[in-house]
Amino acid sequence: MGEVIRSDLVVVGAGVAGLTAALVAAADGLSVTVLTKGRAWEASGGEQSTSTFYAQGGIAVVEPDNPEDSVALHLADTLAAGAGLTDPLATEPILADGWEAVAQLVGWGADFDTGSDGRFLRTREGGHSVRRIIHAGGDATGARVQQALATAVAQSPVRVLDDAVATQVLLADGRAAGLEFVSGGVRGVVRAASVLIATGGMGHVYSATTNPAGSTGDGIALALRAGAEVADLEFIQFHPTMLYVPGAHGRRTLVSEAVRGEGGILVDTDGDSVTAGVHPLGDLAPRDVVARAVTAAMRRTGSPHVWLDLSPVPDFARRFPTVTAGVRASGLDIDDLRLPVVPGAHYLCGGVVTDGDGRTSVPGLFAAGEVARTGLHGANRLASNSLLEGLVMGRATARAVASEPGVRGDVDRPKLSELPACDRAELQDAMSANGALDRTADGLDEVAALLEGAPARRLATVADIEDANLTLAARAVVAAARAREESRGCHYRADFPQVDEVGRSHRFRLVEGQMVAGVLVD
């Protein structure tokens, strides 16, 4: 057993939500330890460990003195995208705090693109009625945000444990009291009054995703095993335009929604518009609408992809350097001015249920960022609301943990030596075939049988831990998808294509190894 670390707050995850919370909490005088599976910033130029780094779109935020925009208008756009499941009472405060959160980020060193008048340049993306998306470095917003936060953390008293994988939340008298983790093959413990899960999503439940390799559902699994509620896990957003590379698996290049916002056009392999007659906003419709339109076009033409026509976008390579680099790294020619694209697993709209301060149903346990279900995203996330949520909820959570009581009582540390775990490739293929964009009862039953029959595996390596987490996270997604016998937002049931008149969120908990449905919430 390694050392026992004591902190006021331990954060799992080093993306926008986790590092923002760490910085704010440390500034308030709390001792903070951050665990990250990779590094908060990979200076060598290799694959980064956070989804934040790969965010191309930007941050959706209302400038107070912009006469064309308002928090009320941003709220209306968010509600429309959320397909009836966005909670307006939870959402409005998040949107309203956005400008102040961005100002704090600028204070930590983030540098956003500005025009000759010194004001932020703004773009428009799918589902937005006005230009309100700000960017840094063109399509490198996430990378610039990640670098600014990591640099600020390095200059703060926050302790960061690189290459550390959390294995379980420790409990004392029913409240979170710390974490057990593995680093370099050695187990360690962080004792803390508050635990923040900020691990991002679970893109690697599927065979093709825009997420980095570490997005294996760790936070969902940690929270479920600790007794926390999850909700809306059936709503996995597939980005409509992931670069198509034949035979590729794992993380693939995202082609930013901003490309379509600047004039890029989706056409099928016959040259016809993909979204004509599908939605009034056309190629800038909400992502769930466009992703299904792309899938329908592929099915109609028999092609494994559609085309994204770049010819209307002026000076593409300069405007979108990140996409350009990804295209060239994949061996494709950007000078063709058209890219083969397909939908790819991109974002978890649901997650661990929290209140407006990031509190979960387990005292002392918090969640923020993509892993959390605040009520902001509903059944489908509005483009560029994710970095906004991470910033705002990271700040809110940090303020809330300052009031948490200290840990009392003995810590319960069950020995975690083995867990059910499917073969990763088999799980990903099954989820891609039956738990992705088109779902049916028969298909979901098939993948559920695979997951429920997962053999116990000794947790000897990080890959073993990740496979166990993927298995549990996939079980939760499938349980939610089976329970929702309608089609809404990111969730489409071919056997239930209608939308129910009343939209409700389904909550689940893990009880003695079984996924148990909780109360339906309007």
Image: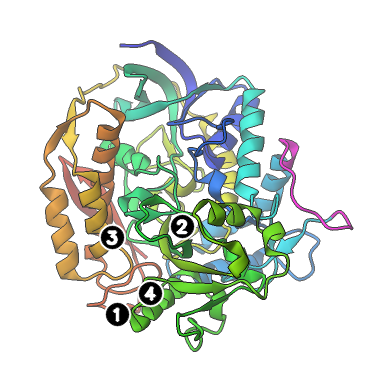
Kind of residue at badge 4: Thr
The circle on residue 51 is none
Viewer-proximal residue, 416 or 485?
416
Q: Which residue is mark 2?
A: 375
Q: Look at the numbered disc 1 and give the secondary structure of its residue.
A: loop
Q: Look at the numbered disc 4 and give the secondary structure of its residue.
A: helix
Alpha-carbon span between mark 1 and mark 2: 24 Å
Viewer-proximal residue, 211 or 498?
211
Disc 1 and disc 3 in contact, CB within 8 angstroms: no
Q: Look at the numbered disc 2 and give the secondary structure of its residue.
A: loop
Kind of residue at badge 1: Pro
Closer to the N terminus: mark 4 or mark 1?
4
Q: Which residue is mark 4?
A: 295
- 469 versus 342 height, above or below: above
Viewer-proximal residue, 241 or 410?
241
Q: Quadrant of residue 456?
A: top left
Alpha-carbon span between mark 2 and mark 4: 28 Å
Q: Quadrant of the N terminus?
A: top left
Q: Which residue is mark 3?
A: 432
Query: What residue range appears in magenta?
Result: 106-118
Crowding near the residue tagged with mark 3, few <14, some 14–19, many ≥20 C-alpha atoms within 10 Å: some
Is residue 504 visible in the rendered structure shown here? yes
The circle on residue 497 is 1
Q: Look at the numbered disc 3 and give the secondary structure of its residue.
A: helix
